[in-house]
Image (cartoon, rainbow, N blue to C red):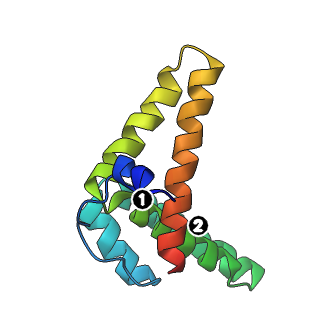
Amino acid sequence: MTTRRREQFGRDEPLLPMPPLTEQALRVAVRTIDLSASIRFEAEFHDAWQEAVQTDSTVPMHTFLHRWVVFEALRRFPRRAQRLDALEHAVTDADNLEDARRASAEIGALLDEAHREVAA
């Protein structure tokens, strides 16, 4: 990734450190970053737990944890969170397919950056 891209996405200070990949740590981090998202977190945790029990598999819980650690990675930097929000609105409000694709591509780049942080 180029330096220009990093500046564009906002390499400001994180609101909190990257949480460990545990249910409790993510619960606290999500509640800290976005209180309204904590409701979705709890509902999805319950659903993943139920599916894990029914299928006798840990995959639903691993998928759940990964999804929420990426959520956290995207939102722990204020400027990146603001940019993501603006891009999501740009996709929704796009007057044409090209504008929607351009904003979607930038969302994809933000997701790639968040995935790299999670993997580090």
Judging by the rendered image, the residue that carries numbered circle 2 is 47
> What's the amino acid at mark 1?
Leu
Label 1: element kind: helix
Image point 50% across, 61% down: which residue? Answer: 113
Rendered image: mark on residue 74: 1
Residue 68, image x, y percentages = 48, 67
Q: Quadrant of residue 3?
A: bottom left
For the residue labelled by badge 2, is the local secondary structure a helix, a strand or a loop?
A: helix
Query: Which residue is most to the top?
Result: 95
Q: Quadrant of residue 119?
A: bottom right
- Name the kind of residue labelled 2 in the image: Asp
In the rendered view, would you say 66 is above or below 86? below
* Picture coordinates of residue 93, whole percent (x, y): 48, 21
Q: Earlier in the sequence, mark 1 or mark 2?
A: 2
Label 2 crowding class (10 Å Cα cut-off): few <14, some 14-19, many 20+? Answer: some
The residue drawn where x is 34% and y is 52% is 7
